[in-house]
Image (cartoon, grey):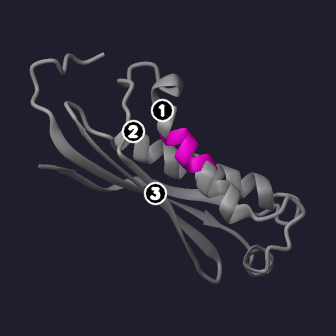
Amino acid sequence: MVKVGAKPVQFRRAVAEAILNCAPATISALREQALPKGDALAVARVAGIQAAKKTADLIPLCHPLAPHFIGVEFVVQSRCVKIRCTVEIEAKTGVEMEALTGAGIAALTLYDMCKAIDKSMHVDGLRVLQKLKQ
């Protein structure tokens, strides 16, 4: 792990995004909550939040953190779902890995919940959109 003891505590925010590409019929089923496994967006939101909180358990050299806020949002489009995870904290280290983990796991959860009806799906574009410290 990187030494962060001498760094000042600062407000930090990171926003990450992932994109689940899928068929238009999958988008319709998602919007209508007609998937075999239920309300995929609600489950994926909780999975993303839970994953962001557990990042240090999943990625060995990440510091264990206690974020003040974790939000997972979805923009459902005609052929994809854009997933954004925002994480905020006051700490000595950033929360980019937490935001990436939250967005990635939310995307994988959507994939899992839609795979019964769409074999062509793929996840793209996992990336940090914003990193802020004040």
Q: Check disc 3 and give the amino acid type.
A: Gly
Q: Quadrant of the N terminus?
A: top left
At 86% from the left edge and 58% from the top edge, which residue is drawn? Answer: 37
Closest to the observer: 111 or 3? 3
Rendered location of residue 13, percent (x, y): 27, 51
Q: Earlier in the sequence, mark 3 or mark 2?
A: 3
| Mark 2–mark 1 CB contact (< 8 Å) | yes
Q: How many marks?
A: 3
Find out whether residue 105 is within the magenta segment.
no
Inter-mark Cα distance, 3 to 1: 15 Å
Rendered location of residue 111, percent (x, y): 72, 56
At 66% from the left edge and 50% from the top edge, which residue is drawn? Answer: 108
- Look at the numbered disc 3 and give the secondary structure of its residue: strand
User: What are the residue bounds of the magenta stretch?
Assistant: 47-52
Crowding at mark 3 (Cα within 10 Å: few <14, some 14-19, many 20+): some
Inter-mark Cα distance, 2 to 1: 7 Å
Crowding at mark 1 (Cα within 10 Å: few <14, some 14-19, many 20+): many
Labelled disc at residue 71: 3
- Look at the numbered disc 1 and give the secondary structure of its residue: helix
